[in-house]
Amino acid sequence: MGYTELTVWTRGIIMDKEGRDIVNSVSASARLEGKYAQAMENYVDNPDRTNAPTRKYCRVSDTVLENELTYENEHPNIVVLVEGTMVKGWDYMRGMPPGGTLIINTQYTPDYMLRFVPGVERLAQLVCVDAAKLADHKWLYYRLGQLGLDRLSTEGAAERSKAIAPDIAAPLIAAVVKSTGIVKRETIEPMIANKKAFEMALNELHILPLKPVAA
Amino acid sequence: MSTKGTHIPEWLTVPFAGITPAPSQEKGQDLFPTGNWRSIRPVYRDKLPPCNNACGTNEKIQGYLDLVKRGKYLDAYALIKEDMPFPSVTGRVCYHPCEQACNRGQYDEAISIRAVERFLGDLGQALPRDVVKAGTPNGKKIAVVGSGPAGHSAAYQLARLGYKVTIFEKSPKAGGLNRGGIPDWVLPQDVLDREIERLVELGITIKTNSEVGRDVGWDDLKKNYDACVLAVGLTEPNSVRAEGENKDGVLYGLPFLRDIGMATSKVKLGPRVAVIGGGNTAIDCAREALRQGAVEVTMITVEANPQEMPCVPEDLHDMLEEGVELMHGRAMTAVLGNGKVEALQLFPAKFSGAINASPITINREAAAERFAVDNVIIAIGQHASLAWLPAEFKSERGSIKIDRFGRLGDTNFFAAGDIVQLGSGQPLMVVNAVGDGKRVAFNLDKVMRGEPLEPRKIAVDVLMDLNRMNMTYFPHFPRVKQTLLPPVSRRRTQEEVIQGFTEEQAVEEAYRCFSCGTCNACDNCYLVCPEPCIARPARSNGLYKILVEYCKGCRVCIEECPTGCLEGVPELDFDTGVVRMDTAFAITPGLHGRQAQELLNTANKPAKQI
């Protein structure tokens, strides 16, 4: 596969851990598979602000990472939006080479979400997964509106358990693995805490294949 | 907030390096358009207040209370006149379903909506000219049969739409049930006269002493008019089917009141009067009987207790204050006496259920009671007299057969009021008839213009309930009471029992309105927004605007909206409001890449010569 960049967009504090779990587990499995990989967070975004859009990065390469000192992904091949509303909120497609993948956590279909995506012509596939439903993450996700107000967060509550992807990250990792094959399912699955949601997501993805213009 | 490494466009340069403008400062919100933090968006969406929904004619009650609160009485009067031709009448006689539905009733006491309506109605009566004008004449002629509430309302709305309306009234004076069914001490005749004058001012012709079937027939109406509204009402009193009901001294409720109202009454009541029935008309009859000289008035009802009586509790209370006795659980089976009423034969009885004409079970095994009286007034409802109507339009419950738009088949005849509402399950009251008249007038207008008829659509579809409002902003506050004449003095006079509000009282009462679900420009959202992202050019419903590029969706405005008109709508339901943030924290592409490239290249550079 050569060289792949994965950028995860998430919400500050309330979904910070979910984003971090995705990049950490993907890079860890890639290293287990003998590839070169790294994962890091973007602190320029000020991720300690509730609801603020923040980024997490991961790079996987068959050869030594030449740009390991660059602290943002300039040409992401895979973009994950941990919260569906972010589809309207940022130019997350910036720098994506043709043939990329966009994965969104939403209950809407890819057909509906397509209208919000800037630069659709670069996408090879649009993947929608209702991660909140699959992970049965009621207490966090369905109260998202209130969460902006009462400052509950996974930075504290969910993180106390130290488990990787106990919640909505699990279906999103499944979506990344199944739609792009960046790492093997066998290597990453043992790391995931919420195995049930992971397996359900493998079957319940909505993948919309698209034709990238320049590919 | 650091802007280090951030590309700031030229037009957003700030006076001092490193200092960014606060959101409240000019262009401050442009520099950090944080609208992409939001997952829900606050939206102003007015809902339907329960009072408006409960009102028979859907008066915009919240609207006029709000205007009264702000001292705009004339605007409030104009608003009420959209749906209600005679607020001075309903302000006195209405059984106010709005007040029963009022959300404030669950909190402390319902708003005294009727009293404020009366205040506005009286204000309108004092105006030299009405605020309502007749529409541009369209050359079509409409006949309205009956000048009661439904006919009055239909004629009024049709005149506003530009039709040439003629009302036929069988009595010597116009007013129908408003005049003949409501005693003077509730609705003084001059108030009603003034409202009838207002109708004439709109260019409506009123032909009194013209009864349909006698002076004007079905074919005349069909031939001489483009369309016709039948609002004939229920004119014939129901009988109890008791033995000896034809004896002297047996009176019927509505004719008894009607003759007094039309000043044609020759009735002299004896000292002891019994009233049969437990409805609102029976209460009016009992109270009128006192004023006509009776000493002891007893109301005989089939219902087992006062709570079951199909009447308004306030009126019942006022009646008892005036000294009327109640006798429950009895049915009259015979009128005894030699040619004239001397006594009634009563048996224990039970009443089973609904308001309109359901069977009564009389226990004839029990011992009969003899109840000595001089007069008996039977007030157990009315039925229609429809001999003139073609048989195809008569319904099996003795009313006119109509479709759901009030139309008789595919003719240009429409019917409205008690005549069609009888047996439909809803209580027969003035305001329901007015609403019926209004809707039929609009439907008739559509038919005349050749437009398809559609069922009524409510503009705002959600009915607001108390749980969805923020009660923190509403302290408990007692209802402003209308003054009543003392019971002893009102027993013998025709003077109005309930007194109107003064201006101060009306404003105080209007201030108690919750404004359920409708923005009343309280400015709370504007004040509580932690970021200045609610803008308004003026304090008014509809003028508040949310700056979606900046709103972070914190929900503070939604939680703090007292009336519940602000709601959070999922952001993805909107196609609009896309904020592709390209300024703050959006690092120029390649900036760090270039730095990293230089770092990489350092290894290949020859060491510096020192």
Image (cartoon, rainbow, N blue to C red):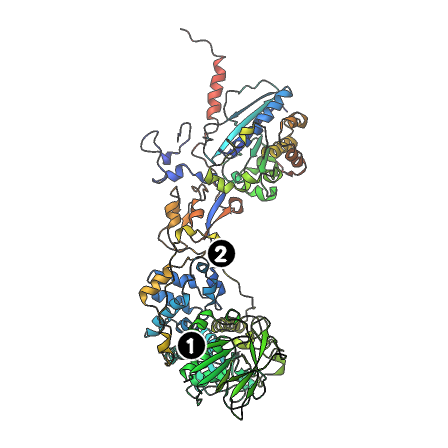
Identify the residue at the far front of this view: B367
Q: Earlier in the sequence, mark 1 or mark 2?
A: 1
Q: Which residue is mark 2?
A: B465
Q: Secondary structure at mark 2?
A: loop
Residue nearest the viewer, comparing B565 with B18: B565
Q: Residue A61: horizontal and vertical position, in percent?
A: 60, 22
> What kind of residue is marked 2?
Asp
User: Which chain does tag 1 point to?
Assistant: B
Q: Residue B91: horizontal and vertical position, in percent?
A: 40, 71
Q: Residue B366: horizontal and vertical position, in percent?
A: 61, 79
In the rendered image, the vertical position of residue B530 relative to residue B473, given as above or below: above
Tell me if B349 is positioned left or right of A46 in this view: right
Disc 2 residue crowd, few under 14, some 14–19, many 20+, Cα 10 Å: some
Q: Are marks 1 and 2 on the same chain?
A: yes
Q: Which residue is mark 1?
A: B323
Does residue A95 appear anywhere in the picture? Answer: no
- Number of marks in the rendered image: 2
Q: Residue at x 57, y 33 (%)?
A: A80
Identify the residue at the far top of this view: B610
Residue nearest the viewer, comparing B601 with B569: B569
